[in-house]
Amino acid sequence: MPEIVLPAFWKKNCSAAFADVRYRICSSDLNDSQKDAVLSCLVTRECHHQSTVKLIWGPPGTGKTKTVGFMLCSLLRMKCRTLTCAPTNTALLVVTQRLLKNVTGSLEYDTYGLGDVVLFGNSERMKIFVRPELLDVFLDNRVKILYECLVSSSGWKGSLLSMMCLLEDHKRQYELYLNERSMRDNKEGKIEGMSKNKGRNRIQGKEIDQSFEDKKGKKNIKKVIVQVSEKAEFGRSFLQRLVLLGQKKELLNVRHRMHPSISLFPNRVFYENQILDGPNVKERRHEKRFLQGNMFGSYSFINVAHGKEEFDSSHSLKNMVEVAVASEIVASLFKESVFTKKKVKVGIISPYKAQVYAIGEKVKNYSADFKDDFSISVHSVDGF
């Protein structure tokens, strides 16, 4: 690996914390471009005479999430407060998983030491309970656990006092428990009776809804706002704005996930042939063919005729004809996997949440556990 050169002022003021982090970076399994990107960000953090903005970019499969996760772990070791944001919940969760993998790998006592890592957001939209490994750092879950521990009636103090009273006078405590239970049952019976009477006496009627014209007017206003926003380019990402301002970019130039025949076109057109193929994608075993036919090679563009895009309730696009085609291909792969007894992992990627959900519903009968012989995973682009 080539020597990573640091500025002279940094070598002079190099802290012990950074020296340790630098050693870990240099001895890690990051490739050279990833190491350069992480070190460049850490050096820039201490450099006050120039812009402290760094832009790391690269096509899919170059390890952006891995690089960011390693950088966040390094900043944590250097006791640097860091706020991490992402345009989608999926992207944020994937980065958090990568960070925790790096952090917990160096912890001596399981999750002890994760107190400095906090994940917060809308638990339903993030589907946090599908990823139980993230609950240790999820803010709402921590508050819930602390509340249960500190609440007067059932917390630590209340539980200890209750245990002491039970041991000192178990007969009286049992009598109190029976009385409380009897009172609670009577109270619940009265409430149930009141709710039934209320239901019988309820006046039938409907609330006045908005007129059709009002609804139509609101839709037109919303459409105009969207058009104005698009014309003003309010939807540009922070990354796009930085590029337009001429911000220098740290390019991750080794692709580990895409077959060379697939990456050839985007590499030539969009990246001026700067992207290198990783050694793993050059191996013969990386080229797999499970189904017979020319359309099932390394990659294919399949023209799905008669498909129609439509919006769901959250204004996300889906195409049910494409969903049916994807389902048929998955069924063929499953049949071939059973026949040949080969272990097959299928990944389906869509840029639209509605399409991800529709495909997921169509193929939900197949296993999502990668330990099984045939497994399938459906995600947005950020999910992979």
Image (tube, grey):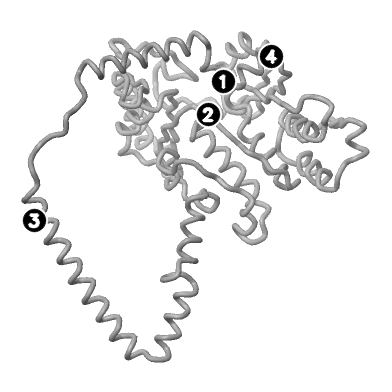
Query: What residue does disc 2 label?
Result: 87
Contact (CB < 8 A) between labels 1 and 2?
A: yes
- Secondary structure category for the residue under label 1: loop
- Label 4 close to label 1 by CB (< 8 Å): no
Q: For residue 63, which quarter of the picture?
A: top right
The residues bearing labels 1 and 2 have C-alpha atoms spaced at a distance of 9 Å
Choose between 287 and 247: the one closer to the eye.
247
- The alpha-carbon separation of the residues under discs 2 and 4 comes to 20 Å
| Horizontal side, residue 253 vs residue 176: left or right | right
Tag 2: amino acid: Pro
Mark 2 vs mark 3: give the one in front: 3
Residue 219 horizontal side relative to residue 296, left or right: left
Q: Which residue is mark 3?
A: 197
The answer to which of marks 1 and 2 sits earlier in the sequence is 2
Query: What residue is shown with label 1?
Result: 237
Q: Looking at the image, is mark 3 or mark 1 nearer the viewer?
A: 3
Foreground mark, 4 or 3, reads 3
Q: Amino acid at mark 4?
A: Leu
Q: CA distance from mark 3 to mark 1?
A: 57 Å
